[in-house]
Amino acid sequence: MNVDAHQHFWNPAREPMSWMEPEHAAIDRAFGPDDLRPLLAVCGIGATILVQAACSDADTDSMFEHARGHDWIAAVTAWVPLDAPGRAEARLGELVAEPKLRGVRHLIHGESDPHWILRPRVLTSIALLEERGLLLELPCVYPLHLGDVPELARRFPQLTIVIDHLGKPPVGMPEMAHWEALIRAAAGAPNVVAKVSGLNTALTDPRWGAGDLLASVEIALDCFGPRRLMFGSDWPVALLNGTYERVWDETTRAIETVAGSDAGQVLGDTAARLYGIAATDREGGAAW
């Protein structure tokens, strides 16, 4: 089964996205399940992982509302206040009632402290995730954040840490060598995995294609292997430089070129295993 391991829903009129700037005007509107479902059908994707888009309880509540109404939303990465351990524990106590809860994420790239994730109070909350068997997703943005991943993985060896968007590699730039060193160091910890997602918005040329993604995908596959990599669209952010279908087609082409017979792991199997996605019939789709 093909799995989109990274997509969002939001409604800025109801829940403002604090990270949106004028350059995000094209996606500054509501996006919901009815917008995404036809695109999944066209691309042959059977399940998605819905990921937080705002650091708020309201955004998390909205995600679970969507997830309860659509079987193809197979897992949710929620938000809890990691910098407030008491509140984080209480909120996790509420969220355990949600059967699709799989992980937690905070928008660390929006914090002024690039090492926010290593603050003592945050580490106390992360220990709660490890105890509960939840994943920690990190929206790392090069050149920040990636350097903290090995230390985080060492402190919490039973915690699965997910690097979103391969840490936003500086595609086509001389800094790619430094990004490679950082991502390889992170991949050296066996409890760290990564998403091949968000690469198209790291590119400025609207004519981008699979060839522009090959270097990043090849490095990621070499250091993580196919069982620790997964595809994600990063929709609707992806619409800033492409369409859903184009992101799927071109990323798939790059993954198949590099991974060969192991491409299926990256395109679905890894996400299904790590997020506990059952092979079921999703809203009239194929039974997997």
Image (cartoon, grey):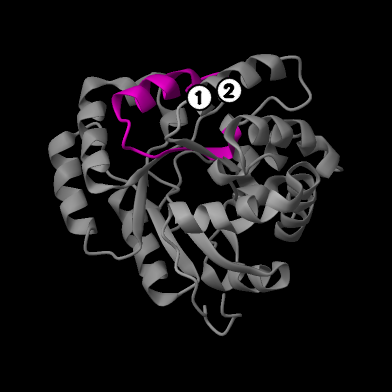
Q: Amino acid at mark 1?
A: Gly
Residue 239's place in the image compared with 30, above or below, is above
**Could you classify mark 2 by the number of other residues whose Cα lies within 10 Å: few (under 14), some (14-19), or many (20 or more)?**
some
Where residue 200 appears, as percent x and y from the top left, is 72, 41
In the image, taking residue 52 as reference, residue 232 lies left or right, namely: right
In the image, taking residue 272 as reference, residue 233 lies left or right, namely: right
Q: Secondary structure at mark 1?
A: loop
**Could you classify mark 1 by the number of other residues whose Cα lies within 10 Å: few (under 14), some (14-19), or many (20 or more)?**
some
Question: What residue sits right under mark 2 in the picture?
Answer: 184
Q: Secondary structure at mark 2?
A: helix
Q: Amino acid at mark 2?
A: Arg
Question: Which residue, as the protein is rendered here, is positioned at the far bottom?
Answer: 284
Question: What residue sits right under mark 1 in the picture?
Answer: 188
Residue 44 visible here: yes
State the extent of the magenta-drawn residues as a range: 143-166
Quadrant housing the C terminus: bottom right
The image quarter in which residue 174 lies? top right
Q: Write the residue at 70% across / 19% down.
A: 176
User: Camera-side residue: 113 or 6?
Assistant: 6
Where residue 259 appears, as percent x and y from the top left, is 73, 45
Residue 86's place in the image compared with 75, above or below, is above
Residue 145's place in the image compared with 87, above or below, is above
Residue 130's place in the image compared with 223, above or below, is below
Label pair 1/2, CB-CB below 8 angstroms: yes
Whether residue 156 is in magenta: the answer is yes
User: Camera-side residue: 9 or 200?
Assistant: 200
User: Camera-side residue: 205 or 169?
Assistant: 169
Whether residue 118 is in magenta: the answer is no
In the image, taking residue 244 as reference, residue 265 lies left or right, namely: left
Residue 14 visible here: no
Disc number at residue 203?
none
